[in-house]
Image: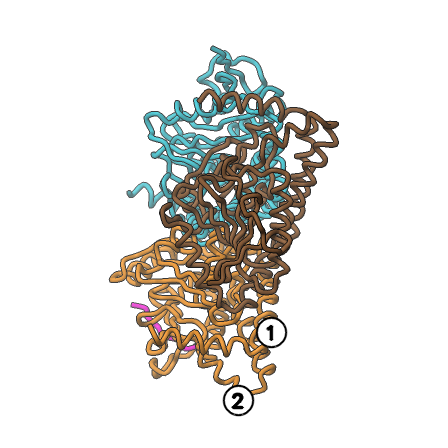
Chain colours: A orange, B brown, C cyan
Amino acid sequence: MNNDRVNSAGQHAVNKDVREITVDVDNGLRVITLNRPKKKNALSTEMYDGLSQALREAAEDENTVITVLTGNGDYYSSGNDLKNAEKFLDFDLNEAASKSSIRVRDFVSDFIEFPKILVAAVNGPAIGIGVTTLALCDVVYASEKATFYTPFSALGISAEGCSTYTFPRIMGVSKASEMLYFNAKMTAHEAERCGLVSKVFPDATFKKEVFSHLQSLLNLPAKSLIYTKHLIRQWDIEALRKANEAECERLKERWSSGDPMNAMVNFLSRRSKL
Amino acid sequence: MNNDRVNSAGQHAVNKDVREITVDVDNGLRVITLNRPKKKNALSTEMYDGLSQALREAAEDENTVITVLTGNGDYYSSGNDLKNAEKFLDFDLNEAASKSSIRVRDFVSDFIEFPKILVAAVNGPAIGIGVTTLALCDVVYASEKATFYTPFSALGISAEGCSTYTFPRIMGVSKASEMLYFNAKMTAHEAERCGLVSKVFPDATFKKEVFSHLQSLLNLPAKSLIYTKHLIRQWDIEALRKANEAECERLKERWSSGDPMNAMVNFLSRRSKL
Amino acid sequence: MNNDRVNSAGQHAVNKDVREITVDVDNGLRVITLNRPKKKNALSTEMYDGLSQALREAAEDENTVITVLTGNGDYYSSGNDLKNAEKFLDFDLNEAASKSSIRVRDFVSDFIEFPKILVAAVNGPAIGIGVTTLALCDVVYASEKATFYTPFSALGISAEGCSTYTFPRIMGVSKASEMLYFNAKMTAHEAERCGLVSKVFPDATFKKEVFSHLQSLLNLPAKSLIYTKHLIRQWDIEALRKANEAECERLKERWSSGDPMNAMVNFLSRRSKL
C-alpha cells in the first residue's frame, strides 16, 4: 500500500502531530489536511502559509492530478483564527491590516490559480474563509454534519475569498445575500440544494467513501481533466482576480478602521452567553 | 416603541389611507408598503414615482441600513396596472410608449442603484415587474401564499426589470425561459428551490417573523453590510444597466407597435372566462 | 389535423424510415426527431449535418416560432457515434481531428445562434453532446427515464458544447465539475433540482403532455417570444462563441494526440465487462 506522508517541503515528516497542515499521498490521492483539531482547525498564520505551499507543491507535482482538502477532527475549519487579530495590538494597526489583507489575498489567489482538480471533503462545520474558498475548489463533498457559516458582518469585516462574485452565481443573489450580509448558516443538505455542495454523505463513512471514490478516478486521463479545468476556469479567472483584489482592499480598510475589534468583542461576548 | 410613519417627503403623513406607497420606521426597520390592496397593489403611475422616491429617501437616510419592501392585503403586487395602458388611448401611441418605457427604466434603475440592503417580503402573489424587481433586491422572503408570474408574452410585450439578465443567472436558462417565454407561474416553494427566494414562511406569521428577524439584524455593523453589498453589485452593475436600457428600448417598440393592446384584450378576455 | 412531414430540404419525405433526422409539423409545432433508435440515436456525421440543416430551416421558416427537439425510441441521444472515430483510422490523424472539431464547432454554433424558441423534450438517456447542447436550448423537459451523462474524461477528450461556460452557471461549479471531470451521471430529478431541466414528466405520457403543452403556446405573440429570446441570448452570445471556439481547439488537440483512442478502448472494454 502506497501511503506516503510528505511535509510541505516534500520530505517525510518526522513528527506528524507538530504540523498544522499535513500532506499525505494515499494510494495515489494527494490529501491536504487541516490538522489543528483542538482549535477547530482555525487558520493560524502558519496554516495560511502551509496550505498555500501545499497547494503549490500539488500544482507542481507531475504525478498529482486530484488533490483533496479536508480537516482533522470535528471541524473542517473554523476559518481565520480570531487570535491572529490579537497580534494587531502589538503593531501599528495600519501595518497589521495591510499585512493581513495581503496574507488573505495571496492565500485566495492560490485557490484561484490552482491548475489541477481540487476537491474539498468538508468533514464538519466550515466558517468564514473556510467556506468562501470552497467555491474556488472544483468539487465539494460534505458530511451531513457539515455546516456553512460566513459571519463577516457580525465580525465588522466584509466578505472575502471571491464570495461576492462566486456566491450569487452559485446559489442566486438572495441566498448569497442571506449568508454574506445576514450571517445565515447553511446545513449540508441546504448547501447541496443550492449547488455549493455536490453530494452529502453519512458522517460515519464520509472520508472512507469520498477517498475511495476519488481513488477510483485516479486512472482517468490527466490531460482531459486538466484541460477541461483550464477551460472552465478561464471564463472567470479575470473576474476572480479582480474580486480578490477588491475584497482585500476593502478588508484592509475594515481592519484599519478598528470596527472589527469592537464587533469581535460583541460577537465573542454574545457567543459566550449562549 | 419607536414606530414612525413618514411619507415620501419624509414628513409624518396625516392620512395614511390616502397614500398608495407608505413608509414606516418600525423599531428602526424602514418598511415600504405597496398600499393599494383593493387593486391587488397594481402599480399606478403614482406608485412608480412614490416607490422610486421612497427608495431614494432610504438611500439617503443616514440611519437606514436595512429596508424592507412589502404589500398590504392579499397581494404583494399584481405588477403594472393594465389600466395605465388605457391612457395610451388619449395620447399619441409613440409618445405614450416612450413615456412608459422611461418610467419603467427609471423605476428599475432605482433598484439597480440602491446602495443599501433591500429585502422583499413577498406576502402574496407577485406579477410582472413585481417579480422581476425581486431579483434586484438583496434578500427575498416569501409567504407560502406567494406566487411568481411574468406573463410578458401573453401581454404582447417583452421582459423587463433586468430579468433577461438576472433570471437565467439565478435559476438557470430553462426555468427562466419557462417563466419569461411560456408564462409559467412558480409557487413559493418552487421559487425557493430555484434560488429566487431564500426562505418560505407560514402565511399566518409571515410579516411578524420576517420583521422581527430583520430587526434583530439592525445592530450589525452598517459599513460591513453596505461595503459587501457594494462589492457584490459592482460585478454586475454595468451589465444590469445595459440590460435595463435594452429591455426598455424593446418595450418602447412593443408598446408603439400596438400588439400589446390586442394581446391584452385576448388575455383579459381569456382570464374573465376562467 | 395539420400534420406534415417535411424533410431537411423542406419537401415531403417519401420514406420516413430512411432519414435519421426527421422534421414534422404537428398542429403548427415544428418537431425535429433524432431517428436512429437502433443505435440509441448516436449522432452519425450525417445526423450532425441533418440536425444543423433542420435548425437552419426552422430559423428561416416564417411560420415557426417554437421548435421541439426529441428522440425516437428509448434514448434521447447517446451522443457522438463513437464509430465516427473509426474513420480516423483511414485518414491522417491530424486531418481527421481537424475535420471532426470543425463539425462539432459548426453544430454547436447552430444552437448558439438559433434565433427562435428551442425546446428539448428529453425522452430518455442523453450522453455527451446530447447533454451539453441542452444547455443551449431554451427550455428542457425530461421524461423520468432521462439521464444526463458527459463522460468526456473517460473518453480522453475534453468538454464541448459550451458546457465549460454554461454548466457552472446553471448548476454551480461543484456539480458541473462532477459531471465534466468525474463523469457523474444525473437522473432526471437531479437535473431538475439543479436547473438543467424545467420539469420532469411520467414516461408513459411524456411526449403527449409536452407536445400538447407546447401547442397551447403557439398562439402567443411571436415577437414577444423572439425579442425576449434575443435579449436573453445577447448577454452571453460572445462568451458562448468564444467558449465554443476554445473547446473545439482543445478537442482538435485531444483527437490529434491519439489519447482518446486508448481511452476509448479502455472505456468500451470496461463497459463490455459490466
Q: How far is the residue under mark 2 from the one under mark 1?
A: 18 Å
User: Which of C108/A189 is in front?
Assistant: A189
Element under disc 2: helix
Residue occupying image coordinates x 56% and y 62%:
B64
Give how far across and how far down residue C55 sits, in percent. Answer: 57, 27
Above-or-below relation of C164 to A43? above
Give me the disc on residue C10: none
Residue type, numbered disc 1: Glu
User: Which of C264/C248 is in front?
Assistant: C248
Residue type, numbered disc 2: Asp
Residue furthest to the bottom: A90
Q: What residue did someone put label 2 on?
A: A90
Above-or-below relation of C241 to B86? below
Segment colored magenta: A1-8
Give how far across and how far down residue B73 sits, in percent. Answer: 46, 41
Label 2 neighbourhood size at 10 Å, few (<14), some (14-19), many (20+)?
few
Give yes or no for contact between labels 2 and 1 (Cβ–Cβ under 8 Å).
Answer: no
Above-or-below relation of C187 to A126? above
User: Which of C160/C199 is in front?
Assistant: C199
Give how far across and how far down residue C186 sits, in percent. Answer: 38, 43
Q: What residue did someone put label 1 on?
A: A253
Q: In the image, is C229 to the left or to the right of A131?
A: right
Q: Is residue C245 magenta?
A: no
Q: Earlier in the sequence, mark 2 or mark 1?
A: 2
User: Which of C9/C274 is in front?
Assistant: C9
